[in-house]
Image (tube, grey):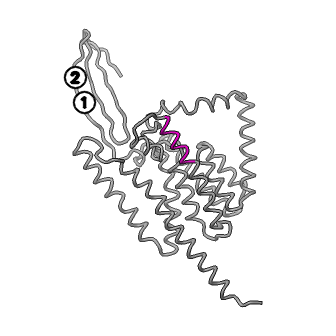
Amino acid sequence: MTAQGRAGVRILGLDPGLRHTGWGIIDACDNRLSFVAGGVISEVLPTFTRKPLFSHRGAMVSLLAVAVLGVYRASERSRPWTAGAWISVLSIKPQLVPMVLIYLAARRRWQAIACASLILVLLLALTTAWLGLSIWFDYVSQVRHLEVFWGTGTPGYMLNVRGALTSVMAGEQHDIDTIAYAVWVFAMALIAIVLVHRGVDRALDVRSTYALVVAVALLTNPHLFVQDAVIWAIPLVLHAAARGASGEWPAFALFALSWPVLFTATRFVDAQSGRHALWLAPHMWVLMAAPLLIWRGWAISCRRTGLSATTMRAEAPSR
């Protein structure tokens, strides 16, 4: 940004970041540069400020969060067309769809998957008729390169495994991305195996199950904007509701209440040192801990359910 004056040109430079935005002003006159002013604008975490939630980007990510919840509610109420419609909305972030489909398959919600497939095929056909077949080739070939046009969409800012690896690993981004994609594929395979092994198709309360699936999807998928962290509200709330209903909420409550303390302490350390003093940003530690905590609660619940079912069969009178 520049301003022309009698003395030459005054230039305002901005360096937006996840937690701090740097700015500086210089004057350029007769091939000479002179410093005018500079500073830092700080935010705790822009994802949780008002601006993204009420901007057009905030409206989009809020819609995605509602879609994640909508898939769960519709599938559990045997409304396949509604579930399919919500999956089509979620396809705005196609990297989140595979894990949701794995959940629906494990729950044997075949009608919901069929309805979603029909709706997506219809949308693909309409898009092709309007924009031409080449749009899909252009999308596949160019979508990955669009990251550089979004400041908070580059790997270093992502609140997922790819972002964490970028922060802590030295090396080419291509090699880091390969590892991140491998982790994503492995996570999907692991979730599919675990859900089938646990027999979730026969479970009555699957709030923690769905919370685990969504949490792992958010953590391991290869691309999420910073503002997409709002979607985390859905798995966390579902898991909290499930734990509260079973009386197993203290560990989760302690985890949730530790967030403000963690962010405040690490922000103070960073401010004192003038840089990120920790090996990995605190919010990344929190998001990595969340799926582990959900997994622990879900596993305990599955174990108790299995023991209860075994006891009931043992106590049933033989014919």
Q: Position of residue 311 (x, y in %)?
A: 62, 84
At horizontal 48% and vertical 41% (from top left) the residue drawn is 55
Magenta-drawn stretch, dominant element (helix, strand or loop): helix
Residue 142, image quadrant: top right
Q: Quadrant of the N terminus?
A: top left
Could you say whether the residue bearing mark 1 is in a helix, strand or loop? strand
At horizontal 42% and vertical 39% (from top left) the residue drawn is 156
Span highlighted in magenta in the image: 174-184
Circle 1 Cα neighbour tier, 10 Å, few/some/many (<14 / 14–19 / ≥20): few
| 208 w.r.t. 310: above or below | above
Residue type, numbered disc 2: Phe
Q: Which residue is mark 2?
A: 35
CA distance for labels 1 and 2:
8 Å
Residue type, numbered disc 1: Gly
Q: Position of residue 199 (x, y in %)?
A: 66, 67
Q: Which residue is mark 1?
A: 38
Quick check: is 183 in the magenta stretch? yes
The answer to whether the residue labelled 1 contacts the one labelled 2, judged by CB atoms less than 8 Å apart, is: yes
Count of residue discs: 2
Give the residue furthest to the right.
Answer: 319
- From the viewer's perspective, tell me whether residue 81 is left or right of residue 155: right
Residue 104, image quadrant: bottom right
Q: Position of residue 119 (x, y in %)?
A: 73, 46
| 147 w.r.t. 213: above or below | above
At horizontal 70% and vertical 51% (from top left) the residue drawn is 84
Circle 2 Cα neighbour tier, 10 Å, few/some/many (<14 / 14–19 / ≥20): few
